[in-house]
Image (cartoon, rainbow, N blue to C red):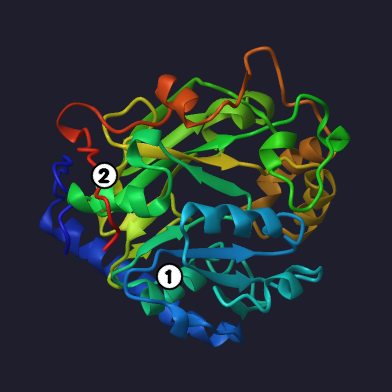
Amino acid sequence: MPDVGSLDYKRPKLWRRLRLRRRRQGLLWRAFRARRHLKVVQNNSDQIASHDILLFAVVRNEENRLPYFLDYYRGLGVDHFLIVDNGSDDGTRALLRGHADVSIWETKASYRTSRFGMDWINRLLAQFGHGHWCLTVDADELFVFPKALGADLPSLTSVLDQNALIGFGALMLDMAPKDALGDAVYEAGQDPIETLPYFDPGPYRRERQGPLNNLWVQGGLRERKFFENRPRRSPTLNKLPLMKWNRRWAYVISTHSILPPQLNMIYDGPGGDTPSGALLHTKFLPEIVSKSEIEKQRGEHFTRPELFDGYYDDVASSPVLWDETCLRHEGPQQLEDLDLIGIGKGAKRLNVALPKDRP
């Protein structure tokens, strides 16, 4: 297995390692079986070259987001998109079809039963991602990182390769409009940050959890607005979206955690020592008001969805998320100045000399 570099990792006892290995093998078996639920719509994977950067995503009814999403990640350096369409009934599939750099699978299976789509993603990662730098994101996430690491993903991954690192963590940063959610205006193809320009600079708290040694970051905008009285139920904001994939690995809960467990040490959260970026989370476009009512009925996004009915009701009421503590997003340098992203500190600081040519 590739080394995780100089990152500190406390090796668990033998019996715990064996349990985690069995758990990883179980996740890989689930992913292998998930192939039965994935029907090929468009397979252009024969176009993937050995050095290509790949993006994996599960989508549902995202025809408004996808035009900008595809343009954004193509501009960032993604060479091929591998997309699972989970039962869209809008124009999502028609929008994705016909692009030589997009492969599409469809499934109407349960998002929740598939561990919130991760069985499908782990299957595609194992089949197509081995040896590639792979970015796994949602349609409402825009990946950003420090300017010192380059202007695009080829530059970033070159720096990571140069530093013998095999992954890059990120803070999920909720973006919001200044007005009530339902009053915001967005058109397909528009940069969603124009509609959602504000974010909470903090506070964010972080802790390690056993036995996976996975990070748990909470705080920020959604906790302030929706979970103030029950902060332990607020969303998990740490992710490991960019990995140089190995078919023996498996994401556990979204991209919040991964097995083998030492991979979770790649990221230690905002203000930590490890190099990191952010996922600008554009969940709160105006369509969220009507979508919240639908998702509450579907009950597909939480293990115990009934516990989050109040959250869906709050979002559907079209609240104002902005307050005077919010900042207007100005770019990666601002996030670095706030210590939300960075090139690392001390012994974990990256050597950022960029190679001239991509291999």
Q: Is residue 49 above or below residue 153?
A: below
Q: Kindly state the secondary structure of the residue where label 2 is placed.
A: loop
Q: Quadrant of the C terminus?
A: bottom left
Residue 301 in the image, given as x and y percentages of width and height: 64, 55
Tag 1's secondary structure?
helix
Give the image location of residue 77, x and y in percent.
46, 57
Task: Give amino acid for label 2.
Answer: Leu
The label nearer to you, 2 versus 1, is: 2
Packing grade of label 1 (10 A; few <14, some 14-19, many >=20) is many
Image: 318 above or below 252: above
Disc nearer the start of the sequence (2/1): 1
Q: Which mark is residue 122?
A: 1
Of the residues shown, which amino acid type is indicated by label 1? Asn
**Can you give x and y, in whole percent of width and height, for residue 270 in the image?**
39, 29
Q: Quadrant of the N terminus?
A: bottom left
Disc 2 crowd rating (10 Å Cα; few below 14, some 14-19, many 20+) is some
Q: Residue at x 42, y 41 (%)?
A: 170
Residue placed furthest toward the top: 324
